[in-house]
């Protein structure tokens, strides 16, 4: 009997910690949301009134139209290029045994193990020397460093699942490697490619460090613009910064919801050891 | 036709010999990807390493000597570790019991989805939300005062604890999801066997799960540590970036973009990488003291 009380207490404690974490997290998100639609909110539980004008104010003050367009271009290019570079490389690594394969795998793991801020500073230095610092091209190149290896490592298990005889059959019927890719492999791999690219999308929208180090005034993505707005707060109304934060939240969460339809949540942190069947 | 004949006469052609070693058209597909990593990761790293030995004063180790003689600079290492170590350890210690509880649930997806939220929102948004939520008029202090736990608002922002909390909020979900994937990877029949032999929950954890989990937990610790270690936005936004939370990444950033001393910045980045590598190697070294083998239950 003593034992069962102890284990009940233990279970209760575990759930209490989960509850505490989630309550604070939700409270944090809800206070940003509430503040962004508040007219005046000082010293009370809820604001005095609600308004949507901060969204218009934020849109003008932070040039969100431009920022969103830059974000869209940067993220789109990163997703497209990491797919184009990563999927063929994953195919070669999944299907062929060649002498330097272990070295190549290590090379691909390194950018995922070293945190962005460590390699971001030398990378930003090189990009500035090359005249690419502060440009959209620079932002795209820097963001490719972690995303291409990520796509490769997520795609390898997907490709290994496909029966090699399918490709052999395509080759027997006279398809060259390009035709085989376009007509046979890509359609079969579509679920995996979609999952990998959606994860790249979510990660690139939220990628702060690399974009922060490389971007200039005209090439800031939404998350970097948000950082600068919070950093220089005091100049602008808190509510309009919160409105910008909500716009950022919506852009990430929309894609997160889409991504979660195709991937297991643990894949967002892991590297797709167990791909969704 | 003649080339084929010649090829036979002289043995396999170069193309055939390469194909026999696994190198053909398909293998070449890996090249663009390798070129990208070499150009944008390896080259900048080596360039930064070289640059760090060419300081403004002209001596070889000038930057490193300056870093390790100025407490305002070398102190950042301890300030970073003082944040990253406790945060990672706390996250791991909370994550283990919760992962063991959640693994028994049938509907894990809702909870894991909720936990993915702070990872996707990122440190900048969490820091921005904290400014209001944990502020003197925020809901956190109001709720605690309404219940009677506090008489005056507690101030966690602009200091060590602000950064600590922001690292727990963004770091815990990451640690938890990794731990969960390791915990669910252990064959449940091992636990059933231990239970049949009369081991209680604590003994089952100590004797069966823990030895199997140690390798995974070591990797989880390293990956979570790396995340907490490279904290920049929260140390600036909710911390005390001039003093208590002047972490090493702030020092590197200031050298590069405020003093425009790329040589010094590269040196700090190299030191940052070296310290982190030391911790990772130490943790993974400890791992080898424990059991290593299959956790998925081999048929014997």
Image (cartoon, grey):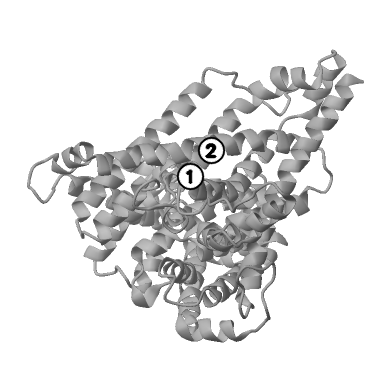
- Give the SS element for disc 2: helix
Camera-nearest residue between A213 and B293 = A213
Residue at the spot of label 2: B88
Report how far apart the C-alphas of labels 2 and 1 lie in the structure.
7 Å
- Give the SS element for disc 1: helix
Q: Is residue B150 visible?
A: yes
Q: Is residue A118 above or below residue B196?
A: below
Camera-nearest residue between B2 and B111 = B111
**Farthest-out residue, left:** B58
Question: Where is residue A125 shown, x and y percent of the image?
Answer: 26, 59
Q: Badge 1: how crowded within 10 Å, few (<14), some, or many (20+)?
A: many
Q: Badge 2: how crowded within 10 Å, few (<14), some, or many (20+)?
A: many
**Farthest-out residue, front:** B151
Chain to which the residue tagged by mark 2 belongs? B
| Residue at image coords 54%, 75% | A244
| Residue at image coords 47%, 56% | B238
Question: Where is residue A92 shown, x and y percent of the image?
Answer: 50, 51
Camera-nearest residue between B65 and B189 = B65
| Mark toward the start of the polypeptide (2 vs 1) | 2
Q: Are marks 2 and 1 in contact (CB under 8 Å)?
A: yes
Question: Where is residue B25 shown, x and y percent of the image?
Answer: 45, 55
| Residue at image coords 72%, 45% | A18
Q: How many marks?
A: 2
**Farthest-out residue, right:** A1
Residue at the spot of label 1: B228
């Amino acid at each position: 009997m003593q034992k069962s009380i102890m284990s009940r207490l233990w279970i209760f404690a575990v759930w209490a910690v989960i509850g505490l974490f989630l309550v604070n997290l939700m409270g944090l998100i809800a206070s940003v949301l509430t503040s962004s639609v508040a007219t005046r909110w000082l010293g009370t539980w809820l604001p005095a009134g609600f308004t949507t004008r901060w969204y218009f104010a934020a849109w003008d003050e932070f040039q969100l139209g431009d920022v969103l367009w830059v974000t869209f271009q940067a993220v789109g290019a990163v997703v497209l290029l990491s797919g184009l570079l990563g999927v063929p490389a994953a195919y070669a690594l999944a299907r062929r045994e060649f002498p330097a394969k272990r070295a190549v795998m290590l090379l691909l793991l390194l950018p995922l193990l070293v945190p962005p801020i460590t390699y971001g500073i030398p990378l930003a230095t090189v990009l500035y020397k090359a005249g690419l610092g502060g440009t959209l091209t620079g932002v795209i190149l820097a963001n490719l460093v972690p995303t291409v290896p990520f796509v490769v490592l997520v795609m390898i298990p997907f490709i290994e699942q496909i029966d090699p005889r399918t490709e052999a059959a395509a080759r027997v019927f006279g398809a060259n490697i390009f035709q085989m890719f376009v007509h046979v492999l890509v359609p079969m791999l579509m679920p995996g490619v979609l999952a990998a690219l959606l994860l790249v999308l979510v990660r690139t929208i939220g990628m702060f460090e690399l974009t922060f180090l490389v971007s200039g005034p005209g090439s800031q993505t939404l998350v970097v613009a948000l950082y600068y707005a919070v950093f220089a707060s005091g100049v602008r109304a808190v509510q309009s910064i919160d409105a910008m934060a909500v716009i950022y939240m919506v852009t990430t969460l929309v894609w997160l919801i889409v991504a979660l339809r195709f991937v297991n949540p643990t894949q967002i942190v892991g590297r797709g050891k167990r791909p969704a069947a | 036709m003649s080339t084929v004949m010649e090829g036979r006469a002289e043995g396999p052609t170069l193309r055939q010999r390469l194909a026999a070693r696994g190198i053909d058209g398909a293998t070449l597909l890996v090249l663009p990807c390798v070129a990208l990593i070499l150009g944008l990761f390896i080259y900048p790293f080596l360039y930064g390493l070289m640059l760090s030995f060419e300081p403004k004063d002209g001596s070889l180790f000038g930057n490193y000597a300056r870093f390790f003689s100025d407490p305002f600079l070398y102190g950042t290492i301890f300030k970073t570790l003082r944040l990253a170590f406790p945060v990672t350890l706390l996250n791991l210690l909370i994550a283990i019991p919760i992962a063991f509880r959640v693994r028994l649930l049938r509907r894990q997806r809702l909870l894991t989805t909720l936990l993915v939220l702070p990872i996707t929102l990122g440190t900048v948004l969490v820091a921005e939300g904290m400014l209001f939520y944990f502020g003197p008029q925020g809901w956190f202090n109001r709720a605690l005062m309404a219940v009677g736990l506090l008489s005056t608002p507690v101030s966690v922002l602009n200091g060590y604890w602000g950064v600590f909390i922001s690292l727990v909020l963004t770091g815990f979900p990451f640690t938890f999801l990794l731990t969960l994937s390791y915990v669910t990877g252990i064959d449940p029949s091992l636990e059933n066997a231990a239970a049949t032999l009369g081991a209680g929950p604590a003994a089952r954890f100590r004797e069966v799960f823990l030895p199997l989990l140690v390798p995974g937990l070591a990797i989880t610790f390293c990956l979570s540590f790396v995340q907490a270690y490279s904290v920049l936005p929260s140390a600036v936004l909710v911390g005390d970036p001039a003093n208590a939370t002047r972490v090493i990444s702030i020092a590197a950033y200031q050298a590069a973009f405020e003093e425009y001393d790329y040589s010094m910045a590269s040196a700090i980045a190299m030191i940052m990488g070296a310290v982190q590598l030391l911790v990772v190697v130490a943790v993974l070294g400890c791992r080898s003291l424990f059991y290593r083998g299959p956790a998925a239950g081999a048929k014997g």
